[in-house]
Amino acid sequence: MTAAPIRETLPSDPASVTPESVVPFILSLFRQSGGRDYLGEAVSQQEHALQCAVCADQENADPALIAASLLHDVGHYLHDFTEDAAAQGIDSRHEEAGADFLARFFPPEVSEPVRLHVAAKRYLCAVEPDYFDRLSAASVRSLELQGGPMSEAEVAAFEANPHHKAAVRLRRFDETGKIAGLKTPAPEDFADMLEGLRRSA
């Protein structure tokens, strides 16, 4: 994977992003905001995103799921809530903000696992008795805001979604990508893959 050239002038408003500018815009989000603290974890938001993408690649995920893993938290860069929203008891619904943005440019195989990755945590807590015990303290706190483990009816509805299996895989990558100091590629190294997926949408 090689980096695509970065345009000198990029949109500052997500609403004005075009198909041609979306990949450079996403890379600019990582440059501008990727260094933020990742919700009390030992890694930054960018480190977490990259570790998730690397984990997906190592697990032989297809390019769409690798992209979803890289971009699953892009909504944190796009919504209007402060970084400490969760600490204030606010669910920012970053998964919806991110998925709605990505759905404008990428196929559903990218956007919908992003939309469902929070629901997948709630699902796994309901169907796997030991999954909750593997959550980090920060993830436990956010689970409370997100509705806790799913009910039986919610589990059935989730399993009926055609993207639920990809979302569960993404969720497992999400829980893994929190290792301080792990060496990863740069966001720019995924640019060609993202551009290919954008053109396939």
Image (spheres, rainbow, N blue to C red):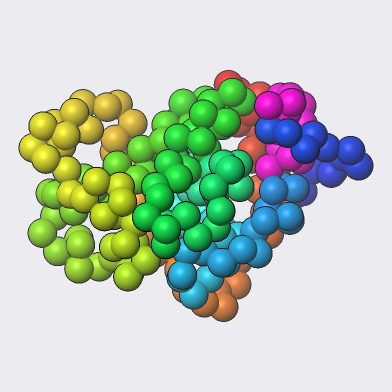
Quarter of the C terminus within the rendering? top right
- In terms of image quadrants, where is residue 119? top left
Find residue 22 and report its horizontal and vertical position in percent: 71, 33
Percent position of residue 84, x then y: 50, 60
**134 lies above or below 193:** below
- Give the residue displayed 29% in from the left and 54% down from the top: 143
Q: Residue at x 42, y 31 (%)?
A: 112
Q: Is residue 24 magenta?
A: yes
- Residue 137 appears left or right of 90: left
Q: Is residue 10 above or below residue 1?
A: above
Magenta range: 15-26
State left or right for residue 59 relative to residue 13.
left
Is residue 154 one of those drawn in magenta? no
Q: In this view of the protein, which residue sits in the foreground, 54 or 127? A: 127
Numbered marks: total:
0
Q: Position of residue 157 (x, y in %)?
A: 18, 28
Residue 189 visible in the picture: no
Residue furthest right in the image: 8
For image coordinates 20% across by 61% down, the residue present is 131
Q: Residue at x 14, y 55 (%)?
A: 128
Residue 46 appears in the rendering: yes
Residue 96 versus residue 51 in the image, above or below? above
Residue 58: percent from left, percent from top: 46, 58
In the image, taking residue 66 as reference, residue 194 lies left or right, namely: right
Q: Is residue 109 above or below residue 177?
A: above
